[in-house]
Amino acid sequence: HLLKSSFVGNSIIESGDGIAVGGELWFTTGGDTAVHLLQNVTFEGNSATLGGGVYHHSSKNRPVFRHLTIINNTASTGGGVGQTTTGTGGTGEINLEATIIANNTATTGTDCQGTYHLNSTNNVITPTGCTLIGIGNISLDPDLRPVQSLPNGTWGATPNRTSPIVDVVSPLLIVFDQFWQTRDPGIDGDCSSLTTGADIGAIERQGCGPAN
């Protein structure tokens, strides 16, 4: 599993069998049928031939992407996430839960490429070049602050108060975010007094505060 981490400004020329993330870290899967989990991770400003932020290549492995922020990455195919798999019906295909894939760049598949299963009711993806199975996609700009260094040594992008990703994930999937902050439905991140859930992505907005 890969938890509470960030990959910023990395690059890779080619991708092979496995999950290549952030241009330099690999999860070798091959015929592995285990469920690999990526949770509370930011991928920003990375580049690759396939999958600027993350590339998945397996016919059997079923990775779960939970509360990820994949933004501003570049690739020839799959600017944010690229995928090569012969799996169907969820086998070998990526499962998305409360994940942002936005503002990436590619010749084919601006933000994503391949087939993705929406396991939670809220994800943010511009589905150009990829197939989304299930409900729960928000095709809007996530309205994030610039990526900045966090006190725990990782990098992340906090949502602005007006962001469509704030307070919308319910029921709660996990207790903490990338920075070990509480994902608490009782925190009013958008000042609406109608708090219903946690935020999409790796970083949870803490309290009402300034608009941006």
Image: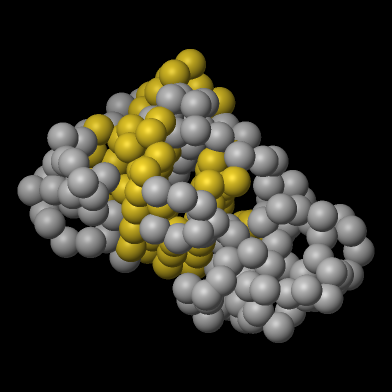
Residue 63 at x, y percent in the picture? 29, 54
Say if residue 195 shows up in the picture. yes
The quadrant where residue 87 appears = top left
Give the vertical position of 25 relative to 37 (above or below). Answer: above
**Looking at the image, is 75 positioned above or below residue 9?**
above
Image vertical order of residue 206 relative to residue 17, above or below: below
- Residue at x-position 74% and y-position 79%: 187
Residue 188 in the image, given as x and y percentages of width and height:
78, 75
User: Is 146 left or right of 198, judged from the image as shown?
Assistant: right
Quadrant that contains the C terminus: bottom right
Color style of the picture: secondary structure
* Residue at 8% across, 48% down: 31
Q: Position of residue 116 (x, y in %)?
A: 36, 43
Image: 193 above or below 108? below
Question: Farthest residue toward the left?
Answer: 31
Q: Name the spot of residue 200 as percent of width and height, x first.
A: 59, 60
Question: For the view shown, which residue lies furthest in the top direction?
Answer: 107
Work out whether residue 152 can be spotted.
Answer: no
Question: Which residue reaches farthest right?
Answer: 210
- Nearer the observer, 64 or 152: 64
Residue sitting at x 69%, y 41%: 141
